[in-house]
């Protein structure tokens, strides 16, 4: 498994597919913090949304390194299709940690914030970036390894899911019945809701409810994707 991860990492770097998403994310962060005295949590909300989009892109690019014939050879060498999936996810997680470290540390090192950043700011920043990165990986994986979206419309479908998940509250306010239908989309808006109301936050019970639901959603998403992947490749 370690050899496969090393092989995947080298293949991903050599394919140069990592350069566009990293470049876009880096530019996004540098432009956002081009000015001093920016608010803490709302700025982290913006980079959390950015990492959601970029990690969807990264996941789709990681799963597109091999051709179909090479992928089936890897299945045989690994002895398990699950190992193939988990190895790909590990590469995505390494990229996500890199982007998260940049997004959280850059404004602190450059002294861009107008207030004093406190431990709970760091906690909310790690919380939002981590969950939205995981949502992005799930969305990118879903439209890469399942049969629900053709390669021709995979990226368009992924963007649709991202937009709908971020516009959840606006859509539900227009039509309440959508509340239950849209539960299949990542609860991204619930993760960043505490980052958009100023830098002083009162953590209440609903925060822990939303956090718990995000964890449950990720676990369900992982199980569903694994089952759909195995069905597609059987």
Image: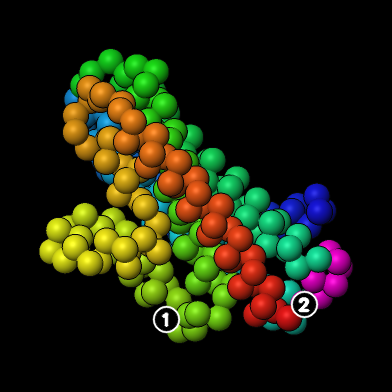
Q: Quadrant of the N terminus?
A: bottom right
Looking at the rendered structure, the secondary structure element under dot 2 is helix
* Closest to the observer, 187 or 50: 187
Residue 212 point in image, percent of width and height = 45, 41
Residue matched to label 1 = 153
Depth check: 116 or 136 in front?
A: 136
- Residue 183 visible in image: yes
Residue extent of the magenta highlight = 72-79
Q: Is residue 223 left or right of residue 198?
A: right
Image quadrant of residue 35? top left
Q: Which residue is mark 2?
A: 72
Label 1 secondary element = loop
Proximity of marks 2 and 1: CB atoms separated by less than 8 Å: no
Percent across and percent down for residue 101 are 48, 35
In the rendered image, residue 78 lying in the magenta stretch gets the answer: yes
The quarter holding residue 228 reads bottom right
Q: Is the magenta region chiefly helix, strand or loop? A: helix
Q: Is residue 64 above or below residue 12?
A: below
Q: Is residue 189 left or right of residue 11?
A: left
- Kindly report the distance in space between the C-alpha atoms of the residues bearing marks 2 and 1: 23 Å
Q: How is the image coloured?
A: rainbow
**Label 2 crowd bin: few (<14), some (14–19), many (20+), radius 10 Å:** some
Q: Which residue is at a point 40% across and 25% down the rendered structure image?
A: 122
Tell me which numbered mark, 2 or 1, is placed earlier along the sequence: 2
Q: How many marks?
A: 2
Residue drawn at point x = 31 percent, y = 26 percent: 203
Residue at left offset 55%, top offset 81%? 147
């Amino acid at each position: 498994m370690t050899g496969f991860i090393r092989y995947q990492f080298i293949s991903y770097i050599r394919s140069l597919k990592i350069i566009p998403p990293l470049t876009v994310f880096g530019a996004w962060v540098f432009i956002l913090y081009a000015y001093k005295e920016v608010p803490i949590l709302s700025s982290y909300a913006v980079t959390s949304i950015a990492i959601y989009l970029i990690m969807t892109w990264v996941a789709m690019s990681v799963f597109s390194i091999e051709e179909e014939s090479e992928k089936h050879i890897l299945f045989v060498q690994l002895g398990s299709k699950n190992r193939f999936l988990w190895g790909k996810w590990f590469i995505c997680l390494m990229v996500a940690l890199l982007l998260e470290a940049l997004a959280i540390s850059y404004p602190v090192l450059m002294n861009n914030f107008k207030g004093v950043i406190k431990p709970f700011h760091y906690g909310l920043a790690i919380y939002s970036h981590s969950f939205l990165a995981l949502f992005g990986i799930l969305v990118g994986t879903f439209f890469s390894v399942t049969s629900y979206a053709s390669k021709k419309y995979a990226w368009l479908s992924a963007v649709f899911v991202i937009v709908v998940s971020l516009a959840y509250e606006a859509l539900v306010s227009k039509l309440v019945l959508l509340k239950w239908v849209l539960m299949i989309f990542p609860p991204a808006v619930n993760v960043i809701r505490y980052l958009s109301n100023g830098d002083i936050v009162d953590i209440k019970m609903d925060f822990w409810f939303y956090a718990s639901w995000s964890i449950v959603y990720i676990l369900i998403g992982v199980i569903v994707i694994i089952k759909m992947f195995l069905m597609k490749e059987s």
